[in-house]
Amino acid sequence: MPKHLLTLGLLAALPLSALAETSADAAPVWSGTGELGLAVSKGNTDSETLVGKLAMGYEDATWRHALGASFLYGRSDDVENAYRYEFFADSGYNINDHSYLFGSIRNERDHFASNEYQWTAALGYGYEAIESETTRLSFEIGPGYRWAKLQGVRIHNNEAIVRGTMDFSHQFTATTSLHDALLVEAGGDNTFIRNDIGLKVKMTEALALKAGLETRHNTDVLPGTKKTDTLTTINVAYDF
């Protein structure tokens, strides 16, 4: 397994307690979750693969920031060392209790899809529709740009896009929660849609089991490539 993927997996699984250290005079700290588990993929690839995720966030009265990374590594249709990995970073400036302005970037490299890699950057407006102790629902929308390269050929598809997101979470009990995140990057050549839904059950204060279903859809794909992929995961999660 490539060293960079192994390192990312360890980061997703090991306690990151150092990031949670604070004092009475310190600014609010980052918090987040790391995941590591086995995936069963159906669509452009039928395989059993290793997956990992790391997501972190920070918010105060003025700013909100989020960043994260994920990877999928395994054998796909008898092809060795197939992988997909992604990095994202978002920052927002709070206008009031419900509205904010944001900027975001996302990079993805994928051996499974039509695009070998793609970069997206966007600016826009976000709105917190629901924010309570148990439920949170927010939306974002704004213009952006995508740089993408087709798999195996030197053809680039660069275009303006409209980026939209929906982020929903609900705490059913002290130990059980649901999270659903929708991302849409719509352009004239291709529209990319990803929905990631997961149910998490805590085993301890920090450790949890998480069952997830990720659906990815592209409206324009290479011949012989399916437009929709699904990824079912059972992960061990660590909250920090």
Image (spheres, grey):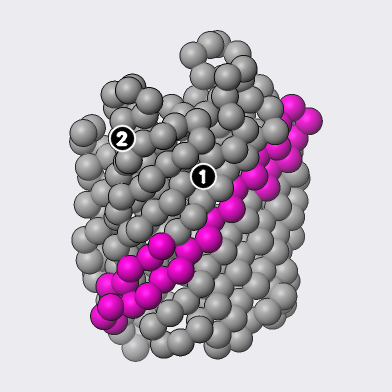
Q: Residue 5, labelled with which disc? A: none
State the extent of the magenta-drawn residues as a range.
184-211
The reply, left or right, for residue 142 in relation to residue 153 is right
Secondary structure of the residue carrying numbered label 1: strand
Chain-order first, disc 1 or disc 2: 2
The reply, left or right, for residue 226 in relation to residue 172 is right
Of marks 1 and 2, the one in the foreground:
1
Where is residue 195? Give x, y as percent: 59, 53
Q: CA distance from mark 1 to mark 2?
A: 15 Å
Q: Main secondary structure of the magenta part?
A: strand
Residue appearing at x 57%, y 43% in the figure: 216
Label 1 CA crowd tier, 10 Å (few <14, some 14–19, many 20+):
many
Q: Does the magenta-highlighted stretch encompass residue 99?
A: no
Residue appearing at x 33%, y 77% in the figure: 202
Q: Is residue 147 above or below residue 127?
A: above
Q: Is residue 93 above or below residue 60?
A: above
The reply, left or right, for residue 26 in relation to residue 146 is left
Label 2 CA crowd tier, 10 Å (few <14, some 14–19, many 20+):
many
Residue appearing at x 70%, y 33% in the figure: 219
Q: Residue 230, labelled with which disc? A: 1
Q: Amino acid at mark 2?
A: Gly
Q: Is residue 61 visible?
A: no
Where is residue 143? Give x, y as percent: 75, 45
Residue appearing at x 72%, y 69% in the figure: 127
